Amino acid sequence: MFALVDVNSFYASCETVFRPDLRGRPVIVLSNNDGCVIARNALAKKAQIPMGAPFFKARDAIRQHNVAVFSSNYALYADMSNRVMETLERLAPAVDIYSIDEAFLDITNIENCISLHDFGKQVQNTLWKETHLAVGVGIAPTKTLAKLANFAAKTWKGTGGVLDLSQTVRQRKLMALVPVEEVWGVGRRISKKLNMLGITTALQLADCPSALIRKHFSVVLERTVRELRGESCLAFEESVPTKQQIICSRSFGERITEYQDMREAICNYAVRAAEKLRGEHQYCRYVSAFVKTSPHDPKVPFYGNHAGIKLMTPTHDSRDILAAAVRCLDQIWKPGYRYQKGGVMLGDFFSQGVAQLNLFDEYQPKKNSDQLMATLDKIHKDGVGKVWFAGQGIQRGWAMKREMLSPAYTTRFNELVRAKV
């Protein structure tokens, strides 16, 4: 038996947790460089602020409905997500984290201690008490049905945010009401093809012969059909799969035309990628950097390129990765262009930094590297100070635009909420 817990309008909800004055007001969150709408609360949806709409096009509707607008605050969202997942791990025997705001719980045999619906309410109430985030809980014998139950729990208020689909009768009743495109793993493109075959609801898909699905679609959709019939086909994963690559990239707040500005940006991305690599407890042997201009600017020619370096010895030292990324940039940099984006990618991962050393390797292991990197990571994590490499620069005019950024309420002491008594 599975339970899918999903935070309602996660990004927008995180912004309102520490802002009680925003209750009853539409809230939206913008993408990098304050470009497009990427998150909305329920009131913003009622105000018909379209998802993905460019911010400048939505300004009139935003003013009309008194919408609160925020830049993306990834530090806040990541910390709130960690709090949610830690709470779930206390409440359930096993947790499979699906995304930043969703997790599957393995609740097999938990009904011997508490009813499934009551358990869902317990999860809902505990998360509200400890994080002040509202969640929907869908309970079913397969992951796909749990996703469907969660969709219904968040769509229909009569469920109270919790729906138990452990009984086959309730499963079929719900599937008859849900459009086929709302089934997990179907999507818009496949749903159009299903509609042409006369399959418009989740129930019709569940009752569709397996031979027909195999003939016209992939084995993935066949597995989805079996899940809708109550046969569990998707394994429960308690541990997050190891990443195959790490990419750090952002669109620049302003177009970059000078080499020094691009070098600073690449250095920053390299250092951040190295931090993520150490967070995964991995070492890498491949470093690459890329740059590109805007493909949508008809006034200037497009240029995009990338270069990579294969290291002989696996490393997670920021100094090695930074030096390799700068060498890659030197190979692809061309003056005279207005660059829109750049980034760094790491690959060829190892679980330990042990390899046959080579006398001619430019990046020989540095003494006390692990201890130094651990110290840097601790400084950044605790927020007790700021340490950076000279190559990262100080005045970063190219940095991402975040003009409506909320405080880091939970990760910086100087931005804690202040209460007046």
Image (cartoon, helix red, strand yellow):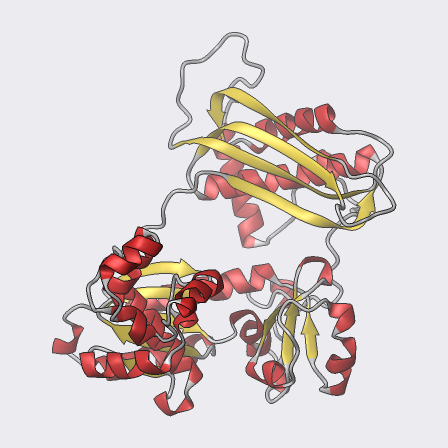
Please give left or right for residue 315 compared with residue 60 in the image: left
The image shows residue 322 at horizontal and vertical percentages of: 63, 31
Q: Is residue 121 visible?
A: no
Taking the view exactly as shown, the residue that stands out farthest to the left is 112
Front residue of 69 and 357: 69
Depth check, front residue: 74 or 379: 74
Q: Is residue 193 above or below residue 375?
A: below
For the C terminus, the quadrant is bottom right
Q: Quadrant of the N terminus?
A: bottom left
Residue 170 falls in which quadrant of the image? bottom left
- Residue nearest the viewer, comparing 240 with 356: 240
Q: Residue furthest bottom?
A: 158
From the top left corner, tell me how far across and down residue 415 is, in percent.
Answer: 64, 67
Query: Where residue 300 sits in the image (x, y, percent)?
Result: 85, 42
> For residue 352, what is the image quadrant?
top left
Q: Is residue 401 left or right of residue 141?
A: right
Q: Is residue 340 left or right of residue 128?
A: right
The structure residue drawn at horizontal position 36% and vertical position 76%, both measured from the top left corner, is 201
**Residue at figure coordinates x 49%, y 66% from the top left:** 80
Q: Is residue 199 visible from the viewing direction of this image?
A: yes
- Judged left or right of residue 52, residue 126 is left
